[in-house]
Amino acid sequence: MQQIQHWLEQHCTDGVHLNSRELVAYRSQTPLLDLTPQKAIQAKLAGAYLAKTKGRGMEFDEARHYQPGDDIRAIDWRVTARTGKTHTKLYREEKERPVFVLTDLSASMHFGTQFMYKSVQAAHLTALIAWAAKKRGDRIGGLIVNQDDYKELKPKTTKKAVLGLIHGLLAMHRPDSDVPQQTSFAEACARLRRIARPGSLVFIISDFRGLDEVAKQHLSRISRHCELTAYMVSDPLEHHLPRVMVPQQVALTDGQRTQSIMLGEKRTEQEYAHRYQARQNAIKQTLRQCRSQIMPISCAEPLARQLGGRR
């Protein structure tokens, strides 16, 4: 308990609600994430990354024999003089890497039993990604979904873009709302598909409770032209029921449904863990079919203890 209290104070949070201070603080933690592209870049705008296509750019790639139509300004005179045959310099083009984050703040994300709510951890991870993208000079855009609304943020490169995303998270995070779920994960994916341009790096931060066949189709389309990474946020209580000395009846809720369950019964504990693991395996299989990288994130401890410089 003392460790949890220390973490809460360290991150300027109560674990349930959001404030700007706890999100702005991730500006100094960008080394936790590596946003280097893993796929060929297809964006049309010039930027700071090297595409696999060859053309006129800032990074020399190779010299080859001159071919009709080559720009004479690109002739490599040193190689030409050394070999006696005309050679042309080739370059890899530098291209921009837009970054989009879909942040799920819907009802099932307002849950947490130890450190913070899943929704709060999702907001923290979103802020970290945004600051990391800003540091690299990438354009950052986002799509935030909660119980009853969607908020789209067009990609920009300025510090105001990150602050705008943070403002959006603060406005859309409503853990105390009793509004029934009116939005859908599939619709959020459909909106993301419309705004994520080819060549984008796309992050989805969610518990993926709403992942269905329609959402899968949209994600598959997105991953054809974008690099997709799914951060699966969970709480330890979702994995296993707590151990108790004396059997007792408790009520569990996912933000939409409430179910009574008996703690302290081994069979119940095994069935509970098996059902959760089966559901998680199904989600992972679907995401793999969508050609997505998968990263588990727990809301039971700080991001710095989980990421450590990886994507």
Image (cartoon, grey):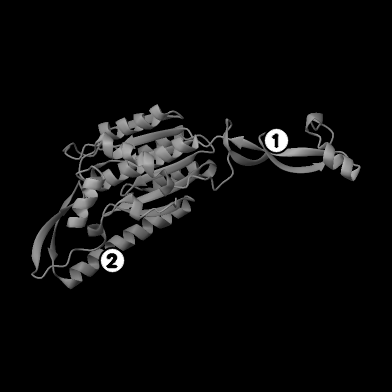
Q: Earlier in the sequence, mark 1 or mark 2?
A: 1
Mark nearest the camera among 1 and 2 is 1
Residue 179 showing in the rendered view: yes
- Placement of 31 over or under 174, stated as above or below: below
User: Residue 65: x percent and y percent?
Assistant: 84, 42
Residue highlighted by disc 1? 55
In this view, the residue in front, 66 or 1, is 1
Q: Is residue 166 left or right of residue 45?
A: left
Q: Which residue is mark 2?
A: 274
Q: Residue at x 34, y 58 (%)?
A: 280
The amino acid type, in three-letter code, at marker 1 is Gly
Residue 12 in percent (x, y) is at 23, 42
Residue 80 lies in what quarter of the image? top right
Label 1 to label 2, Cα distance in Å? 53 Å
Q: Quadrant of the N terminus?
A: bottom left
Closer to us: 266 or 36: 36
Q: Residue furthest right?
A: 84
Query: Residue at 30% across / 51% down in the picture?
Result: 302
Residue 116 in view of the camera: no
Q: Identify the secondary structure beneath mark 1.
A: strand
In this orientation, which residue lies closer to the viewer: 108 or 60? 60
